[in-house]
Image (tube, rainbow, N blue to C red):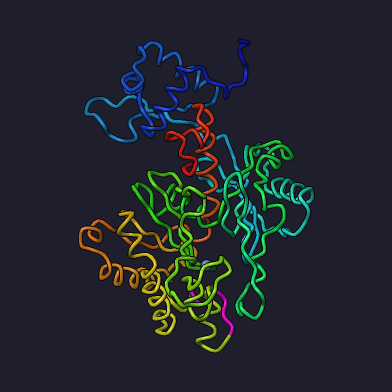
């Protein structure tokens, strides 16, 4: 077989070493020799080559003290040279952020992006978005497109059944999916843009962002709960997103809580999103309670000032979310629930409401190991999640694992 000269193509022993560095979250040469079973001299030579090719980096002293004795240099995967363009096609705003794979925010710009365009225009628009934030010195290595709808890898956004207007008094037009997302456009976009492109649900990305760089760092099983602008959950197990068999795990909005409730756009009846009388938008809901228009920023400000109506409303949101969550928490046994990063200081009453009701609705053995915290990455959870996802896919690729081959073919993880 012809030898390849690309720095990112690894020999089998190099793959073992990079996989060990990843699994140990940084390691010294002795630990790498022990874990891989390779001779120390082989490890030393391979590490030197990987460092020279910009794939590994070295820092003095151990990052995690695993052994007593003189600290030796720690080897890590070098994520500082790669960047991802994180394109957010949000419900209320659209933006593109340039992020280092290591989570550093490098640049950001608002964009206007028409999702109703044909595929060619979408591809051109995404390429232009990446150009907007690209720095002269840094090449964009990958793109993650955040979409505000369920999205299945390899299949696209699930189409929702449509009902007659009379039956669906709240039927949102936004339930219709853009044509370019009806099948997974990742491969076609990768070809069109010349860099790896992946599409991901916004709440999943926020969950991954808090897991890699925010409130859920170090958690074993973290569930991120989105409140604004829609209810949803993202599940991260051992730092990896859990998508479920069909790729739509965490659809909190569509847990049925009323058997005889309203028909929902998803085809179910009495979904949580329909049972909350004023609809899924927090700012609109409070605005209708207070009888005036109000932005989300204003809601957050009022909550921080201690406004009793706003805080009570937010605590009620937490209590009501506990209803579809209690059984799930018992079954999954997470160690952490993270409440919507975008709420900022307004997350505190939601946390209180959740804690209060989940404690009553779960057994002590489940509740005692459970922490509930607000998210930390107010406006940057989604770009941070894009950085985590891009870095994980890059490292998986280095060690020769595609997400579908990881964990014995569990395509839903990764
Ligand atoms: Zn539903």
Q: Is residue 195 above or below residue 217?
A: above
Q: Position of residue 131 (x, y in %)?
A: 72, 45
Q: Is residue 344 above or below residue 397?
A: below
Q: Position of residue 413 (x, y in %)?
A: 46, 43
Q: Is residue 264 left or right of residue 31?
A: right
Q: Is residue 294 magenta?
A: yes
Q: Is residue 173 above or below residue 400?
A: below
Query: Within the image, what quadrant is residue 174 found in?
Result: bottom right
The residue located at (51%, 26%) in the rendering is 400
Residue nearer the viewer, 24 or 238: 238
Q: Is residue 225 magenta?
A: no
The residue located at (42%, 82%) in the rendering is 307
Q: Is residue 398 above or below residue 231?
A: above
The residue located at (67%, 42%) in the rendering is 135
- In the rendered structure, which segment of residues is drawn in magenta? 293-300
Residue nearer the viewer, 115 or 184: 184
Q: Residue furthest bottom?
A: 291
Residue nearer the viewer, 362 or 271: 271
Q: Position of residue 175 (x, y in %)?
A: 63, 66
The residue located at (54%, 83%) in the rendering is 287
Asked whether residue 107 is in view, the answer is no
Asked whether residue 80 is in view, the answer is yes
Residue nearer the viewer, 277 or 227: 277
């Amino acid at each position: 077989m012809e030898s390849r000269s690309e720095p990112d193509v690894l020999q089998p022993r190099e793959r073992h070493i990079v996989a060990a560095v990843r699994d140990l979250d940084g390691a010294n040469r002795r630990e790498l020799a022990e874990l891989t079973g390779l001779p120390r001299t082989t490890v030393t030579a391979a590490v030197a080559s990987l460092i020279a090719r910009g794939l590994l980096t070295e820092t003095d002293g151990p990052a995690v003290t695993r052994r007593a004795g003189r600290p030796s240099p720690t080897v890590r995967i070098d994520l500082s040279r790669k960047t991802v363009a994180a394109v957010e096609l949000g419900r209320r705003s659209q933006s593109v952020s340039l992020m280092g794979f290591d989570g550093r925010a490098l640049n950001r710009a608002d964009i206007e992006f028409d999702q109703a365009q044909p595929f060619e225009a979408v591809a051109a628009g995404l390429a232009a978005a990446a150009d907007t934030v690209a720095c002269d010195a840094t090449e964009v290595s990958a793109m993650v497109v955040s979409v505000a709808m369920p999205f299945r890898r390899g299949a696209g956004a699930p189409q929702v059944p449509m009902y007659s207007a009379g039956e669906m008094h709240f039927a949102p037009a936004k339930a219709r999916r853009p044509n370019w997302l009806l099948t997974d456009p990742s491969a076609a976009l990768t070809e069109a843009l010349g860099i790896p492109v992946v599409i991901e649900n916004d709440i999943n990305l926020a969950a991954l962002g808090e897991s890699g760089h925010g409130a859920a760092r170090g958690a074993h099983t973290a569930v991120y709960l989105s409140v604004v602008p829609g209810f949803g959950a993202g599940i991260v197990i051992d730092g990896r997103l859990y998508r479920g068999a069909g790729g739509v795990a965490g659809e909190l909005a569509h847990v049925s809580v009323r058997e005889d409730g309203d028909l929902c756009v998803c085809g179910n009846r009495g979904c949580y999103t329909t049972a909350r009388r004023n609809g899924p938008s927090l700012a609109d809901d409070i605005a209708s309670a207070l009888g005036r228009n109000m932005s989300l920023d204003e809601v957050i400000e009022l909550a921080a000032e201690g406004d009793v109506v706003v805080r009570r409303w937010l605590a009620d949101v937490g209590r009501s979310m506990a209803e579809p969550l209690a059984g799930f928490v018992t079954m999954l046994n997470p160690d952490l629930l993270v409440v919507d990063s975008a709420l900022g200081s307004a997350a505190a009453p939601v946390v209180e409401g959740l804690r209060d009701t989940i404690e009553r609705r779960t057994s002590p053995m489940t509740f005692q190991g459970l922490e509930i915290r607000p998210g930390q990455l107010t406006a940057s959870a989604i770009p941070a999640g894009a950085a985590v996802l891009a870095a994980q896919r890059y490292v998986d690729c280095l060690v020769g694992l595609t997400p579908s081959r990881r964990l014995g073919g569990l395509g839903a993880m990764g």
